[in-house]
Structure formats: C-alpha cells, structure tokens
Amino acid sequence: MFLESAKNGIIALKINKVRTALTVLGVVIGIASVIIVYSAGEGINSLIVGQIESFGGSDMIQTEIKIPSSKQGGGSEAQSVTNMAMGVQVTTLTLDDMDDINKLFLVEDSYAGVLGQEQLAYGNETYKAMLLGVSASYIKLDRSEINSGRFFTEAEDKSLSQVVILGRKIKDELFGETDPIGKSIKLRKKKFKVIGVLKERGAVMTFDFDDIAYVPVRTLQKKIMGIGSIQYMMHKISDVKRIDEAADEMRYLLRENHNIPQPTEKQTGVFDTGKDDFRVASMVESMEIMDTVTGAITLLLLAIVAISLVVGGVGIMNIMYVAVTERTSEIGLRKAVGATYADIMTQFLLESILVTVLGGILGVIVGIIFSWLIAFGANYAGLGWEFTVPLKAYIVALGFSTFFGIAFGLYPARKAARMDPIEALRNE
C-alpha cells in the first residue's frame, strides 16, 4: 500500500507539472540558502582563522595595551576600544616587561612592536608607509621571510642603529628594479641604511605586510617617535598544552610590574580585570572567539533563511489544499470501495513529502554550485577561502525539507482523510 500510494503521488505530481515545479522551486530556494549559509560560514571561519594564524601559530600569545576601566567584562573592553579611538594613550607597557616575561619558564622568546607612519624618501622618490619597530627576534617568531640581505641584530637594536628592512611594495615604489641593499633612505631627515628586503607576503586583515618598513624598536622609540613604551608583544610558548598557565603567569607578572592589584573573584565567578592596562590573549583564544562569532552569524542567517522555508511550506500547504479540492470525487470513490483514513492520509502526505524531498535534493545541488562559485570568486580575489560544505548542512537541509513536507502537508491530508464518502461522491 505504501508503494502504491507513492506511485499514485508521483502520477498526481506529473499531471500538474507547472504547479509542481513552482512548488518545488520555493523549496529549492530555501534549501539552497541553507547550504550556502553553512558553506559561507565555514569559508569565513577558515579565512579568519588563516588570517589570525598569519600573525603566529597556536603556540603564540599576544600582549597589547588596554585602557583601564572600572567596568567588567564586555563593558570594559568596549570602553577601552572607544577610548583608544578617541586618542587616549597607554604608555605603561615597556621593553622591561618583555625582558621579565622572557624569564618565565614557559616562554621561549618574545618580540616587541611599535607602529607608526612616516614618509620615506630615496632620491626624487617619496612614499608614505607604515613603520614597524620590532625586536631582533621578530624574524624568528613571525612568518615573514628575508628575500635579500638580512634582518638587524639585537646589538644593532640596542645601539640604536639606523637600519631598515623594506617590504616588497616599498622596495618597488622607491627603487624599482634597482637593488636597494646598502643604499640609504631618508626618514625624518635621518639616513637609514637598507640592509634587507622581505619576501612578498600580502595583506592580512587589511594589514599589508608588503607596505611596511621595519626598523629596530629602540631606534623607532628614541630617534623617531620620542617614546619609551611599546604597543604590543608576541610570545612563543614552549608547551602549547600549558598556554593558559603561561598567559596567567604573564598577567600576574605585568600587574606586579605596573602596581595593579591582583583581581579578586566576584560573586558571579568572574575576576575583575577592569584595572588592567594590558590584555593577554593566546591565538587559540582568538580563534575560539572568532568561531563563536561566526557561529552566531550563521545561526542568525539560518533564522532568516527559515522564513523563506516557511513561505515555501505555506506554498506546499496551499497547493496540497487545492489538490484535495480538485480530487474530492476521487477521495470519495476510494473511501467507498474500502480505503481507510490511514490510506488517504498516507497518499496525500507522501505527495507533500515527495515535493519537499525533491526540492531538498535539487536545493542541495544548487547550494553546492553557488557555494563553489562564491569560494572560487573569493580565491580569485586573493582571499584564503576554503570551499567546504559541512555534514550538518546536508542533515539540516534534508531534515528541514522532510519536516516541512510533513508539517505543511498534514492539514490537507487530514482534510482529505476526514471527508464523508457520500458527500465527496456527490461533488462529482
């Protein structure tokens, strides 16, 4: 009986091809949207994770300045960002802090960083570029690589040497095809000797590594910017499994160095870190935060997509309701010759499910095609977009199609199954 009902359902759908096609189209759009949302969510997540990993691997911890606040949690972070945007400066993070952190058991090495922007000049050529003052250990811990020449040494950093390493874009702008090694550029009317050029690396989160000139951090502090503080530090940890322990040790040490009281646990179970003038975060934590953010965005988009699925489901209900009305006499005849309530219910429910399953399969195929096109376009534009459709996308897509087939086909099927055979035959 089940196979017979399925066969009858297929015949009924073939009779009204245009109506069936329009109904299936509504389901296809909704299911394809589910696939695209999941695939795009995975692509965005892989892109962001790749960008974060470009600054360092999972064994890296970043320490950066933060505006102290009396607020806790998100409020504190939001206020810190706002104050920085308004030009509030934090000058408490220093190279001495980095030296102390390097003495910790779990810390292998660190480098400090200070960012600025300056006009560079060579001959008649000028170029405004990002200036990054870093420690000599930068080249060992970062993903940047030397293309020609060399990086500066710790001795050059401590002696405030006026040396510079150029990103590929700056080298091309100032020197063209000429070898810049050994030549001098002007920076704030001071001559800096070019000792190296980095390999082309590209941009990471709008941060273009090829558009940066690298100088010793102490030289930038004393001779260019006139400051004694740093903006951030990167630390390499010897044991990734103990990275949280290492981060806690850094926080404790920095609070001691900056005369900040160690936080006490509140009744809510949260430590009050609002007075901290620094932020310590591992790359693992950063990636977990981004996973949470992209997951929330995916759920939001799925909620929006669900609206289109509901609209498609209403379309199914409407079409099935019309089908029941058109086939009233058929229903009456079937009941008159012995068809039961369950037989009629099964027939019309199967028709509804067939429509949505067919739409679901076609929707998955269309969604995969569009997801691949999005990934292809993103990679063509230079983004590290990974094309993937997670298993849960297929489960959710086909699960939704089956659910809506049953949910929105139930009422018309029950209406058909409850018909009085005499009244139904009289409709003839």
Image (spheres, rainbow, N blue to C red):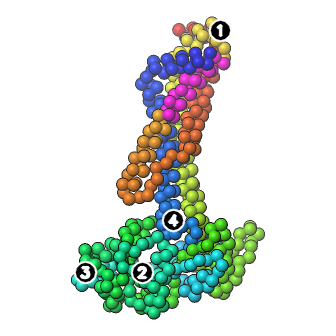
As measured in the structure, the alpha-carbon distance from the residue carrying label 4 to the one carrying label 1 is 69 Å
In which quadrant of the rendered view does residue 310 lie? top right
| Vertical side of 398 occupied by 65: above or below | below
Q: Which residue is tagged 4? A: 53
Span of residues in magenta:
342-361
* Residue 201 painted magenta: no
The answer to whether mark 2 and mark 3 are in CB contact below 8 A is no
Lower sequence index among marks 1 and 2: 2
The answer to whether mark 4 and mark 3 are in CB contact below 8 A is no
Q: Residue at x 51, y 61 (%)?
A: 49
Q: Tell me the amino acid under the disc marked 4.
A: Glu
The answer to whether mark 2 and mark 4 are in CB contact below 8 A is no
Q: In the image, which is nearer the foreground, mark 4 or mark 3? A: 4
Q: Residue 273, percent across and down?
A: 66, 75
Q: Which residue is tagged 3? A: 125
SS at circle 4: helix
Lower sequence index among marks 4 and 3: 4
Q: Nearer the viewer, residue 219 or 40?
A: 219
Q: Which residue is tagged 2? A: 151
Magenta: main secondary structure: helix
Q: Tell me the amino acid under the disc marked 2.
A: Phe
